[in-house]
Image (cartoon, rainbow, N blue to C red):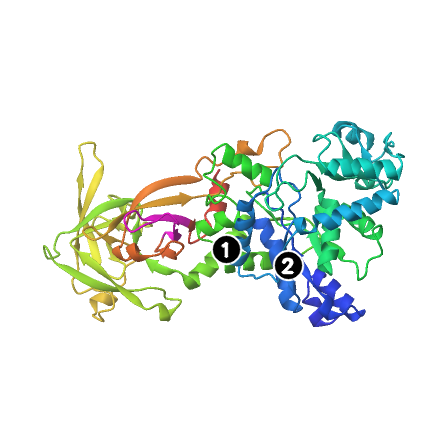
Amino acid sequence: MSEHTESLHFIEQIIKADLEAGFPADKLRFRFPPEPNGYLHIGHVKAIAINFNLGEKFNAPVNLRFDDTNPAKESIEFVNAIKKDVQWLGYEWAEERYASDYFDQLFIWAKELILKGLAYVDSQSSDEIANQKGTPTQAGSNSPFRDTSPEENLALFEEMAAGKHKEGTLALRAKIDMSSPNMLMRDPIIYRIIEKDHHRTGSKWCIYPMYDWTHGESDYIEGISHSLCTLEFKPHRDLYEWFLDNITKLEHHYPKQREFARLNLSYTVTSKRKLAKLIENKTVSGWDDPRMPTISGLRRRGYTPESLRNFVETAGVSKRENVIDASLLEFCVREDLNKKASRVMAVLDPIKLVITNYPEGATEMLEAENNPEDESKGSRLMPFSKNLYIERNDFKEEANRKYFRLTLGKEVRLKNAYIIQGQSVVKDAEGNIIEVHCTYDPDSKSGSGSEASQRKVKGTIHWVNQDTSISAKVNLYDRLFNDESPDQHKEQEFTDFINSDSLEVITAQVEPSLVNLKPGTNIQFQRLGYFVVDQDSTEDNLVFNKTVGLRDTWAKKSNNN
């Protein structure tokens, strides 16, 4: 095997083999086919990336097709959200298609199956049909309507389409094999009555095709060469091919269905039904809550398109199911933001710091580098004066030798500023420290080149100026679940594993330059982590969301529990 072949994942190898066997390169076409019944999540990023990356690699078009066959659950809101997410990830589709574009043709082909004796109308209840299918080890039994004449079935089917029968009373089933070892081949339903208007076709239809009937035919109509889906659809492949084999002789190649392992992420659920339940229970605020694994939630939390694409590429494309640790996703965003995010000062739990020997009423502007990883980002000026804020946990009245932050009688450096030494504290009536007093060495200014400025001290802490800092709302997010597999417990509901500490809302003091940042801007609060300006943030009401810490603390936290 050549080095080039070894570098290809198995789907790329399949396509390469097809091309070498004579499949015309100009007939390659892929698609990403979501159902618009919810918001896309982290698992969809893998499917999106696989299809669009194949398009880029093989110079082939990729369609965005909405499998909109169930008006009871689908809406234009979800269509628009999906389009926004795919574009945000950096992909552009060749054509925007809808399964509903093909409802007329699917109806014609369904009547063809009926006339061939390969489909029949069944008036049994859904429970009766389900019970009739048998078990994986026991053959099913035939419907009493299985041998109805094609002419009678066609008349009933056209009555269904004309709205002459109520929802749940009739269904069109394919006539395949009630003893097939593949349960999906035991006369599956291909049309059902749904008395709801469709978001695109309105009231034209009251019967709607099932996914399995629609999918392969839609792929064929669009000329899709490789229909890629996750492993749970592997048993559907027989049905996919049966439908294609049994409609009128097709004029061009059949699409080829192939399956890959879905992306399973630890400490996460991705079922749309379960995500919707979190919203209904008000566990989260909506589909774009930053704790949600939806693309819109990850975007609002500050994850970047590059970090998500790098994550799925790192996780790889395989044929076997596995669970990817959430820490890999966090590593990918941390690695990306380290290169991009400007460094700023913010104090999340402020305590007052007074430099007693600093000139009263004086203010100076100190230069701070925006991003040491990217010189092109330049620097900014920060106001510095006698009265500052520092983090409460950056000071201890008494501390051991391993504590390298501020304490009485010891020196630390204020980042981009001066070396200070703790002197005394002011306490309230309950004995809580409300103010720390210190002195500074005026010759120790960072970057001044003086001998004092180059003096080594073991600790450096961040700060903001009391007079010019701005109050801001900061949402501190953690993982939504405290169990690695919250939906894999047979005896408990996934909601039993909700992390009650997944959101903490605080008021912080931030440097004044942050007032000009636009929503969606990624920044690093120095020494604290990566944050993003929330979409609801304004100059008068700054809001920041925590994206991820500077290092992985979850493993340490879990080990201590």
Q: Is residue 137 left or right of residue 366?
A: right
Residue 368 horizontal/vertical position (percent): 28, 64
Could you tell me which quadrant the N terminus lies in?
bottom right
Secondary structure beneath dot 1 equals helix
Question: Could you tell me the amino acid type at mark 1?
Answer: Phe
- Viewer-proximal residue among 18 and 491: 18
Please, what secondary structure does the residue beneath circle 2 have? strand
Return the residue found at the far left: 360
Q: Residues within 10 Å of mark 1 (few under 14, many from 20)?
A: some
In this picture, residue 458 sits left or right of residue 27: left
* Depth order, front residue of 400/92: 92
According to the image, label 2 marks what residue?
63
Q: Does residue 434 lie above or below 245 as drawn?
A: above
Please say whether residue 545 is one of the residues in the magenta stretch: yes
Q: Amino acid at mark 2?
A: Asn
Q: Is residue 358 left or right of residue 433?
A: left
Residue 168 screen position, x and y as percent: 71, 30
Percent x, y of residue 233: 72, 47
Numbered disc in front, either 1 or 2: 2
Relative to the observer, which residue lies in front, 75 or 292?
A: 75
Q: Quadrant of residue 92?
A: bottom right
Q: Which mark is residue 331?
A: 1
Q: Which numbered dot is residue 544?
A: none
Residue at 59% of width from left, 30% of height from top? 492
Quick check: 268 above or below 225?
A: above
Identify which residue, 280 or 553, lies in the foreground: 280
User: CA separation, marks 1 and 2?
Assistant: 31 Å
| Magenta stretch, residue numbers | 528-546
